[in-house]
Structures are given as C-alpha cells and as structure tokens.
Image (cartoon, rainbow, N blue to C red):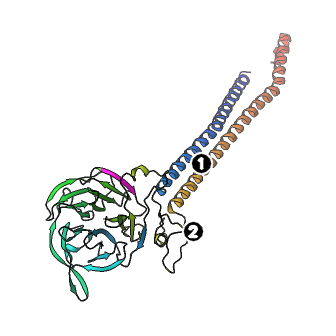
Amino acid sequence: ETNTRDEHKRRTQETKRGERRGREREKARVGTMRRTPLLLRRAWAAMLLATALFVAAASGRRHKSCIQPLLARYVPDTIPEPSGLSFSSTTRRLLANCDHCHYLTEMDELGGFTRYLRFSHTPAHKDIEAVAVDDALARIYIASEGSRIVSYFALDDYTEKKGELYLNELGAFHVDTPGTTDEQSGLEGMTALPNSNLMVANEKNPKLLLNISNSGQVHSVVQPKYLGDISGLAYDAALDLLWVLSDKSEAVFLTKLDGMTIVDRWDLPCKNPEGIAINNLHQPPLMYIVTDPSAPLKIPYVPLLFVFAKPQPGSGLSHNDAIIPSPYSAPCVGCRHVCDEIRKTGRHCELEVSPNDTLHVGETSDESASIPPLVLAATAMVVGLLFLIGCATLAALLYARYLRANAVSGSKGAVLSQEMDTAADDSEAPLVAERERGSLECEQLPGHVLQDDA
C-alpha cells in the first residue's frame, strides 16, 4: 500500500510538471507570435525610412540647381589634362595649361584653338597646375604643384624654334606654404591682383590662400573653411572680387579679395573643375571653366571647356536648393556632344540638353542615356534590403512554427501522462478493494483457523 501511494504521488507530480511545462510553452509561443508582427513592422518601417532618406539625398544631389553653360567643348586633342586657365585682356585670348605638358594652349574668346606656346623642359616646369596673366606687367605666370616654384614669362613675346613658338622666361621664385610641404597637394590656383601682387592657392592639407608679391614674398595667409578644396582662382576687375573654384565641392564661390568673406556661390554641372577665368570684355561677360580627366582609382573624367554667362552676384545662394528649378537654362552649343562623351565613361551628364542644342556636323546624339549610377546604386540597395527583410521574415516564421510545434507536443505529452495515470488508478482500484476485503475477512475468522493456516 505504501508503494502504491508513493507511485500514485510520483505520477501526480509528473502530471503537474508536464502541465506546467505545457503552459509555459504555450505562453512562449503566444508571446513570440505577438512579437513577430511587431518586429516585422519595425523592420519594414526602418527599411522604408532608410530608402526614403537615400533617395532624397540622391535626388538632391542629382537635381542641384546648377548654372548652365552657353557653350561646351570636348578638348582632349588640344588640352589633354586641363588644370589651369587665365584670360588676357591685352591679347583677348585664353591660356590653358595641362599637368604634364610643356606648353600653354592659346584659345579665342569662345574656346577655339589658335596655337601652342611652349616652354623649356626643366624641373621647375614639371607638373604645372596653374597659370595667370598680369596684363599690367605683361607677364605670364605658371606654378608647379610639387616644387612650389612660380616661373614667369613675357606676354606676347616669343622665340621661334623649329617652327614652334617658345615663351621667353624672365625669372622664377619659390612660394613658402606654411605648415605643409606635401607634393601631392601643393600650388593649384593662381591669379594676378590689381596691385601686381598674386593670389596663390595651396590645394589642401591645409587649404591656403596666400597673397604674395610678384617676387614671391608672402604678405598674408588665410585658411578658408567654406569649401572642400581649392582648384582655381580668378580676379574679377569689374567687380573687384575674387572667384574661387573647388572641384571637391563642385562649386564656384565669389568672395572679397581676402578670400574669406563669401558674396555668393553657384553649383556647377561638371565633375573635377580645375581652372577658371573671367572675361569682362565680351558682351555679355563670360566665365570659363575647364575640367581635368584625371581620377586615380576611379572612372576617368572628361577634358572639357565650358563657357558660361558670368553669374550676377545675388543670383546663386537664393537658388541653391534642389527643389527650386535652375534659372540659368539656355540653349548650349556642343552640350549634346559633351554629354555623349561623358556617358561613354559611364558617368551621368548633368547638363541640360534641349532640342535646340547644336550638334557637331555629322554627329548624332542618343537621348536614351544609360541609367545613372545613383539610380543603379539606389536600386541595388533597395533589392538588398528587401532580400534581408525576406530572410528575417522567413527565419521568424520558422522559429515561431518550431515553438508552436514544441508547445503542442508538450501539451499532448501532459494530456497523455494524465490519461496514463488515470488508467493506472482505474486498474489498481479493484486490487486495492480486493485486498481490503481479504483483510476484513481475515479479521472475522476464529483464532484457531488463523493459527492452523499459519
């Protein structure tokens, strides 16, 4: 009887434990099923928010309010790597230099090639990144980026050698740039000021604007913080202001002569702008910009010359918003051809090409441009996020199904254990009753019978 009671007690306890485990599994399953939709909703909301922010940023980047050129030229044959630009009011010619060329390219007021003006192959004339014309002193200055040597030549005075025109060099001087000697980010922009001084720029690390004499003596140094780097400078005699170009910011800034006080700024529709010049003799006044094709470890850019109507102060910052349409739209001569060349590199053309734009003779333009890289990047990002969300959803559903299966098996086990205990109790009930009845009969027999049986 004692063993029977212990066995019954043990089975009762096991039944209660099974029921408790079943309740815990069911509670966990219900909690998981309740949490899973919430987690999925949060994941989807986060994904949609990230996609919206990315698309907004990409759209703002692509649809910035850029000034649009009147003329664009593809110039790989005459200026392979344009990096500096200047305009002479004496000769009414543009002068452009390239990184690894030992000549200046002379052009007319609309960028048409006229001739080459060569200089000697010396270490001081290596890696030329800037050119400037001082009409008052009748000088042409060129600046070497790494060595920081400025050489100057006579304007409109040449020596002919073997059918080529060579500039007559007058002298050279070194420019001290405080705090940096980096040869990869040295002299990058230069322009002549009205007092025959020069404004010279150190590209970056750090960004410097140096006001120096025409013999190299440094008068003042400032460090502008409003732009990514400095790639070109141009003095505007009509406004008595300074134009500062930045290829990293893809913008041109109009500042006071200190280079620190911003008057206005305009976004540019071109990549890697490296040189700028102003022509106030033309009507309307013009602004020229050249772009450098160099792009280490990246898709190469395109060597281009742009001719803009010179922006009026006060018209830039007021339209520096992606939502406001550009107020500078105008038919552009050569923009279709330039856009075709840009698209060949896989880059997006930000020029506004209209049906009135002029094509070169014998050329055609494909209006169905390839998909812009930003759109491809956004599409890839959305597809990747959807794939991750799908994997997470599938994993959550499988996990919830696993918990539900465990909970059901646990509850079935508890019910089966309870049924077995009940069946065992029912089978033992007659035995217990029979034992009790036999015990009672033994107590009712006479003593001698019990003794004989014993």
- Name the chief secondary structure element in magenta: strand
Is 69 on the left or on the right of 242, as rendered?
Answer: right
Separation (CA) of disc 2 from disc 1: 38 Å
Is the residue marked by circle 2 packed among few (<14), some (14-19), or many (20+) residues within 10 Å?
Answer: few
Q: Position of residue 166 (x, y in %)?
A: 22, 81
Is the residue marked by circle 1 packed among few (<14), some (14-19), or many (20+) residues within 10 Å?
Answer: some
Which residue is at a point 30% across and 76% down the rendered structure image?
A: 106
**Residue linked to disc 2:** 368
Q: Is residue 307 visible?
A: yes
For the record, the magenta segment spans: 262-270
Which residue is at a point 24% across and 54% down the rendered structure image?
A: 257
Find residue 392 and name its label: 1
Task: Name the mark nearer the viewer: 2 or 1.
Answer: 2
Is 402 on the left or on the right of 113, as rendered?
Answer: right
Residue 279, by quadrant, is bottom left
Which residue is at a point 85% across and 14% down the rendered structure image?
A: 441
Relative height, residue 29 to residue 427 (above, below): below
Residue type indicated by callout 1: Ala
Residue type indicated by callout 2: Ser
Q: Is residue 98 visible?
A: no
Could you say whether the residue bearing mark 1 is in a helix, strand or loop?
helix
Q: Position of residue 142 (x, y in %)?
A: 23, 70
Q: Is residue 1 magenta?
A: no
Q: Position of residue 280 (x, y in %)?
A: 31, 64
- Which one is earlier in the sequence, the residue at label 2 or at label 1? 2
Q: Which quarter of the rendered picture does the C terminus lie within?
A: top right
Front residue of 38 and 72: 72
Could you say whether the residue bearing mark 2 is in a helix, strand or loop?
loop
Q: Position of residue 108 (x, y in %)?
A: 33, 75
Front residue of 279 and 41: 279
Q: Is residue 265 magenta?
A: yes
